[in-house]
Image (cartoon, grey):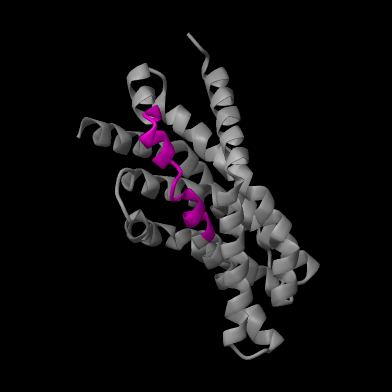
Amino acid sequence: MISAFALFTNQCKRELLIQVRQIRFLVNSCLFLLIFLFMFPLTVKPEVTLLRTIAPGMVWMAILFSLLLSAERLFQQDYEHGVIEQWIVSGLSLPLLISAKVIAHWLFNLLPLLVLCPLIALLFSLTAWETEVLALTIICGTPALLFLCALAAAFGVGVNQKGLLMALILLPLTLPLLIFGSGTLNIAMQGLPISAYLALLLAMSVMATGFLPYAIAGVMRISHIE
């Protein structure tokens, strides 16, 4: 019987290879993020103070929508090719396989987000310290965000036009992450300590990583029975 570590590692390698072969989806989500952040400042007054005020909320909304776009087909191909059905009937740990898949997807999406941080800082006149805080909030908060996207994607497997369904499921659940993610950057702009906010973001990500794979597995099993 394959060990849990070997199963997790093999699944991560498989998912990373798939992501590399389908890099167009990552490019699409990054382009969406950039277009969103480039276009919105054009609709407001070109004042540095105003741009810095709206920056935290705008950046986190853009990250949410770009991750939602990239996660829309997270389980769709596996569903169409019968991979999910094989996972369910194989007797292997379905939550572990799902965790590996989502974590690999997160790692693949994390690097472009971090690379884009200096460009985001340039757009919204962020200082070097504020840019570092933005990167830290992305590292601490996006795991929970992506697991929530994966949960919404699991509900939408096999459904046409799933984007609206995913948005309706996801947006209420992401409010705490958006509040604390943007709040951390706001606090940093005021020169106040950010450790408590980062700890809350990290705690939410740890809880999401620990519990949401079981919820996603339950959704998949119910869909398989139906």
Percent from the top left, x then y, of residue 73?
44, 46
- Residue under the point 26% across and 32% down: 224
Percent from the top left, x then y, of residue 14?
56, 29
- Residue under the point 45% across and 33% down: 98
Question: Which quadrant of the structure image shows residue 104?
Answer: top right
Placement of 170 over or under 77, stated as above or below: below
- Residue under the point 68% across and 86% down: 49
Placement of 191 over or under 88, stated as above or below: below
- The residue segment tinted magenta is 66-83
- Residue 107 located left or right of residue 177: right
Residue 85 visible here: yes
Tell me, yes or no, whether the highlighted magenta stretch contains residue 97: no
Residue 54 visible here: no
- Residue 209 located left or right of residue 222: right
Question: Which quadrant of the structure image shows residue 195?
Answer: bottom right
From the image, give the main secondary structure of the stretch colored magenta: helix
Percent from the top left, x then y, of residue 204?
50, 49
